[in-house]
Image (spheres, rainbow, N blue to C red):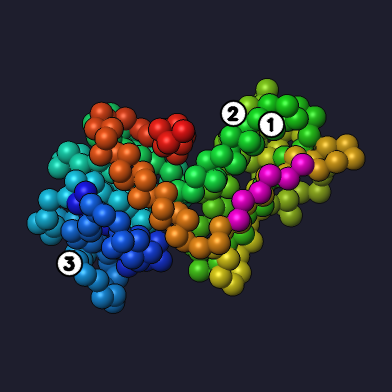
Amino acid sequence: MRILLVGCNGRMGQAMAMRVKDEPGMEIVAGVDVVQDKTNSFKVYSDLSEITESPDVVVDFSHISLTEALLEFCIANKLPLLLCTTGVAGDLDRKISEAAKTIPLFRSFNMSLGISLLQALVRQAAKVLGDTYDIEIIEKHHNAKLDAPSGTAIMIAQAAASALSFEPQYVYDRTGELKKRDHHEIGIHSIRGGTIVGEHEAMFIGPNEVLTISHSAGSRELFVNGAVKAAAFLLVHPTPGLYTMDDLVQSLS
């Protein structure tokens, strides 16, 4: 499998490059990054239009500022895309769905198989407890992370919301109003500090008890392993469509 790695000089991109070196049958044939201060074993371009190599799949760990151009590039070249960029919303979200009608597109804010299972547990808990328990989500990341809340926290909130009998309101800040918590809220809280790779908690808070479902990432290798599996998944699923970690977990079970 020949990989074009977009965002190759970022934290996740560098971790992915190191991981692929040890993966039989996989190679990174080129990278794309606006930052050119890293030494790689493959050629790194600053613009998608400069690429001359012919990859089998594109893996993206870059920034949402590049996502629209990347979608156009993959559609024009009929390339499957593994999109791991966080912070996607609104019109860009719609364009991703449209692109998936033309190319195989695997999208996840978090490539951990454990997070995918956590979402399943959150859906089940919300189905059983959501009408009477308050739901709060806490996410913790390193001090260099740009977006807040994390894309994973949003994914967890969406998993809970999908099982509720009402449409919840996501609340990120309670400092602006003096009022009691509304039961139809899902609170989402961000902590930034040090070198925390990623920690997420979903709390179901009821009368006299608290149920916490949590996940802690020990290293970025966890996410890279998931990305390697997802890239391989795309090669054996050439039909255009929008794929998620749920599809990957089902294929592995």
Report the magenta residues as a range.
Answer: 211-216
Q: Which residue is mark 2?
A: 162
The total of numbered circles placed on residues is 3
Q: Position of residue 151 (x, y in %)?
A: 51, 49
Nearest to the eye among marks 2 and 3: give it: 3
Residue at image coords 25%, 49%: 58
Q: Position of residue 182 (x, y in %)?
A: 77, 37
Residue 26 in view, yes or no: yes
Q: Which residue is mark 1?
A: 126
The image shows residue 69, relative to residue 124, as above or below, that is: below
Tell me the SS state at disc 3.
strand
The rendered magenta stretch, by its main secondary structure, is classed as strand
Number of residues whose C-alpha sits closer than 10 Å to that of mark 2, classed few (under 14), some (14–19) or many (20 or more) = some
C-alpha span from label 3 to label 1? 47 Å
Q: Which residue is mark 3?
A: 43
Q: Is residue 145 left or right of residue 6?
A: right
Q: Is residue 111 magenta?
A: no
